[in-house]
Image: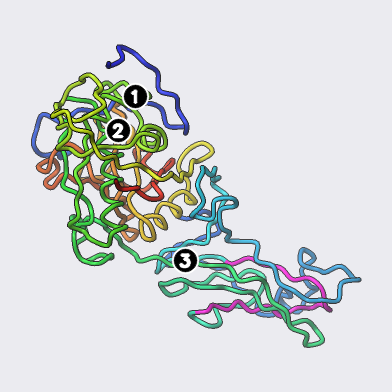
Amino acid sequence: MRRSSILLATTLLTALASCTPVATTDDASAHFDASVVDARAEDTSPTEPDGGEPDGGEPDAAIAPPDAVSAIAGTITSPRTIEGLDYGAVGTAVLTPSDVLNVVVVGRAIELVGSAEGGAPPYTMTWRSSLDGPLGTGPRATVMPTEGEHDVVLEVMDATGAIGSSAPLPLHVLPATFDWSHVRRPAAPPAAGDWMTPVRSQGRCGSCWAMAALAVMEGQMNIDRGDPSFDVDLSEQTTIDCDMHSIGCAGGGSEQSLSGYLHDVGAVAESCNPFLGTDDMCIEGCRDGSTPARYRVEDTRAVVGDGGANDAIRAWMRYQLVHHGPIARTIINMLGYDGTTHLCAPLGGDHYVAVVGYDDVAGLWIAKNSWGARWNGDGYMEVSYGNCAIDASATIVTHVIEP
């Protein structure tokens, strides 16, 4: 039976979204942190090719080795992978504004920071990439690598000519634009085709949380199968009625549903329980009395900020979009969204969408909405980086287990 009232237990920092209903009109007029810089920005900080001895001065005290150490080695201190998550492990990572991840978009520069130990100073340090060869010199080097998957090492030579190196650091250099739907960026990667399922309409039911969660699952199945036309249509109605951590058409949370009900119990096909646009009783089987097949989330990965959006979360989101699939996200102040400026005025209305791509040149996220295919021209929207709270946290599914 439906609950008359139930509180959502938040597993992340995102609270219940009441899900702004479909607008009454058909159309809506409706970086990285300080150590990562835009390639177009002025940079007056020269690198130090002599490994920390500007103008012939003394070696940098911060990288001076202990006297008793003889072996020489390099250490890369920034950027870094997410400890304990490493982009693929299940769980939630907290990212701070000072975090610099080993992800950069092509055309942007990233600062590599390292140190040396052992041997006899002074040191000569050279940064090398498995794709690009030498990248730069010195303990700090601002570089602009080519697109692709790099292994970066810091090679160190001491005063005697002895050579050592750091362990390799994976460096992910992503395309400037990316769109799984190819609706807003038809020429962007990946391979041609709309890898997302058609845009749904939630009507006057505040079920955006279910629509976004199932949009992520449906798109992920297409991606995992390598078939953009596979397009399983999952039942929002069953999720609305049976997810006990939601309040149905009065709101819910995509993250909580993906890691809870859709993981533990699973979704059924739309044909089993078609969308009604209102709350109804939870039924175990299909409307025709048959036993439904279940599509279950294998697990979820998530990142949250320590007080809001930051460049580390944006880096993680871009990486996951390119290397994995769509992302479930909340938009704050959806009632104030302007489809021309891509900003949200403080007019209220929390809302869930599925983020399907980005345009790093324009600084925009591309998202699939649930207000019908005519809304905003095509059912999709673009939101500026750092606006509408869209990149304050993020959740993906690792895989969808099919019947």
Q: Amino acid at mark 2?
A: Trp
- Tell me the residue at 27%/30% (across/down): 239
Question: What stretch of residues is rendered in magenta?
Answer: 112-130
* CA distance for labels 1 and 2: 9 Å
* CA distance for labels 3 and 1: 37 Å
Q: Position of residue 119 (x, y in %)?
A: 83, 78
Judge whether 350 appears above or below 339 on screen.
above
Disc 2 target residue: 209
- Element marked by disc 1: loop
> Quick check: is 370 in the magenta stretch?
no
Q: Nearer the viewer, mark 3 or mark 1?
A: 1
Disc 3 target residue: 172
Q: Amino acid at mark 1?
A: Ser
Q: Position of residue 289 (x, y in %)?
A: 16, 28
Q: Position of residue 31 (x, y in %)?
A: 45, 55
Judge whether 271 appears above or below 196 on screen.
above
User: How many C-alpha atoms fall within 10 Å of the one at disc 3: few (<14), some, or many (≥20)?
Assistant: many
Label disc, if present, on residue 69 of the rendered structure? none
Q: Are marks 3 and 1 in contact (CB under 8 Å)?
A: no
Image quadrant in which the N terminus is located: top left
Q: Amino acid at mark 3?
A: His
Q: Nearer the viewer, mark 1 or mark 2?
A: 1
Q: Nearer the viewer, residue 186 or 158?
A: 186
Q: Reading the chain from its start, which is encountered first: label 2 or label 3?
A: 3
Disc 1 target residue: 246
